[in-house]
Amino acid sequence: MVDDAVASFLSPALRQRLRTAWRQAMGVLAGGVLGAGVWLVVVQQGREWDLTDVDFVRGVATIFGSDGVDRRAVGSYGLYVTLAMGVILVAVHALAGTRLVRRGWWYQTVPLAALSFLLWAVVMSPTRPSGLFGLSAGGITSPAVFLVGGAAFAIVAVRCYSLITGSGWWEEKHEDISAGLDKISATRRPSLELPEERPEEGRVGPGS
């Protein structure tokens, strides 16, 4: 009776749902972390090239309350906050973006890129000296840097999520040998030789 209860609890449908949930969780985590890392690379490189004066990592740390954090650890704190924000944004993509945009993953990058850019430009940046869209911290090139960063984040995050949640990476493909043989037989062309022109195989008799 216990075995039957366990078997009914772990039904094929339930196992499939658990696998799907596990893939989605891993897709959100991997896409968020990798996408946020690419965002930081683009933004920090823009700062190195004097395209923007925004120190994003320290700015994020200040916005999310780094007052009680050791000054030497503010950069690490800002990094962790950025990675967490990336995971949250990909979770929003998984819950809403994939349902609103049901086309290919390239199309799904557009709303996520816009969301990440506007989150910085309209919500976070005005709380800092950089001002709305970061125009006070580098002029027109400053929002351009974050626009490119948002696009790069969305491309990496959405592609990671789509690959990890796709069944091709996780489920084994079992090919039916008999079906394959039937396809081969169906594609074979009939011989155009006359019966008397065909080689006699397996002939048994005096003339063999």
Image (spheres, grey):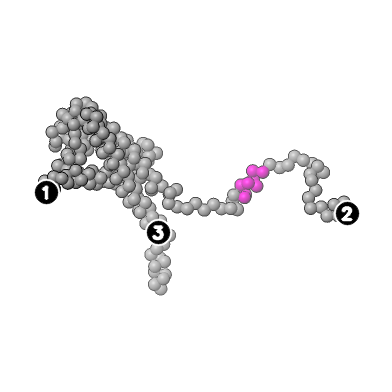
| Label 2 environment density (alpha carbons within 10 Å; few <14, some 14–19, many ≥20) | few
Percent x, y of residue 161: 35, 45
Q: Is residue 18 above or below residue 6?
A: above
| Residue type beneath disc 1 | Gly
Residue 185 falls within the magenta-colored stretch: yes
Element under label 2? Answer: loop
Residue ID at (43%, 60%): 12
Q: Which residues are magenta?
A: 181-188
What's the mark number on residue 206?
2
Mark 1 or mark 2: whose residue is earlier in sequence = 1
Mark 1 or mark 3: whose residue is earlier in sequence = 3
Q: Who is closer to the viewer here, 96 or 115?
A: 115
Q: Which residue is mark 3?
A: 15
User: Does residue 89 appear anywhere in the picture?
Assistant: no
The answer to the question of whether label 3 and label 2 lie on touching residues, with beta carbons closer than 8 A, is: no
**Going by the picture, which residue comes out furthest to the right?**
206
| Residue type beneath disc 2 | Pro
Percent x, y of residue 9: 38, 64
Element under label 3? Answer: helix
| Residue type beneath disc 3 | Arg
Residue 193 falls within the magenta-colored stretch: no
Residue ID at (34%, 38%): 155
**Going by the picture, which residue comes out furthest to the front?**
72
Percent x, y of residue 101: 35, 39
Mark 3 or mark 2: whose residue is earlier in sequence = 3
User: In the image, is 179 to the left or to the right of 14?
Assistant: right
